[in-house]
Image: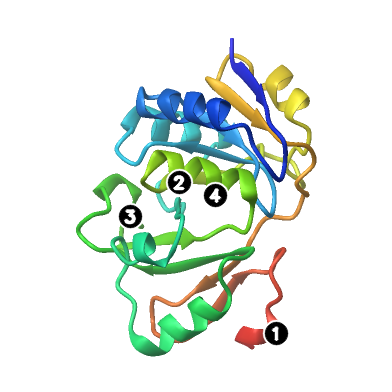
Amino acid sequence: MAKYFDVHPENPQQRTIAAVADLIRSGALLAYPTDSCFALGCQLGNRDGIDRIRSIRSLNDRHHFTLVCQNFAQLGQFVHIDNRVFRAVKAATPGRYTFILPATAEVPRQLLHPKKRTVGVRIPDHAVTQALLAELGEPLLSSTLLMPGEEEPMTQGWEIKERLDHVVDAVLDSGDCGTEPTTVIDFSSGEAEIVRSGAGDTTRFG
């Protein structure tokens, strides 16, 4: 059964955040809120967690996983980013965008797009996610919690706990966090290509 943690949306209880971070370090798969919608997350090198996310969402090996980062210093360890792209990404973060960029050697091979050698990265504007990332001290490997064949992600923590009780290890809940996934911008060619229009405004990349 999944452990259920309920925290304040603006001032999450530090003891609870620390307990969730410890679970992630011990190999747990977490459902957690972001500034766009709920996501599934695990530690970067957690192969079992990656396989479980693929299984829950019925994903193939071309799916771009996302490294959810606390800040730009962390993001820069995992992707190659030139000055022009840096400025565009910096202006849109933190926020409801995922950027696809060429990965550095720090990114485990099983997370990379098999042909492009790219990975998704983002910096969320969400107090609970930021508190968890600060406590963890490293990015969360993540994917939107969107079930196969469904149009919208689940929005209620209790519903996620009820439905995914035996396939995730923990649910972190801070109330509603929306149903619209991030806007995905592919910068791997150096130019902005809008892959998915979502919660983030696309006009700045038009």
Side (left or right) of 79 relative to 11? left
Q: Secondary structure at mark 1?
A: helix
Label disc, if present, on residue 130 of the rendered structure: 4
Residue 133 image point, x, y percent = 47, 45
| Disc 1: which residue | 203
Packing grade of label 2 (10 A; few <14, some 14-19, many >=20) is: some
Find the distance from the CA under tag 1 to the CA under tag 2: 31 Å
Q: Secondary structure at mark 3?
A: loop
Find the distance from the CA under tag 3 to the CA under tag 4: 24 Å
The residue sitting at 29% across, 63% down in the picture is 117
Label disc, if present, on residue 26 of the rendered structure: none
Packing grade of label 3 (10 A; few <14, some 14-19, many >=20) is: many
- Above or below residue 54? Residue 85 is below
Packing grade of label 4 (10 A; few <14, some 14-19, many >=20) is: some
Find the distance from the CA under tag 2 to the CA under tag 3: 24 Å
Find the distance from the CA under tag 4 to the CA under tag 1: 26 Å
Type of the residue with mark 4: Gln
| Disc 3: which residue | 112
Q: Nearer the viewer, residue 130 or 194?
A: 130
Residue 95 image point, x, y percent = 62, 65
Find the distance from the CA under tag 4 to the CA under tag 2: 6 Å
Type of the residue with mark 1: Thr
Quadrant of residue 150 within the rendered picture: top right
Type of the residue with mark 2: Ala
Type of the residue with mark 3: Leu
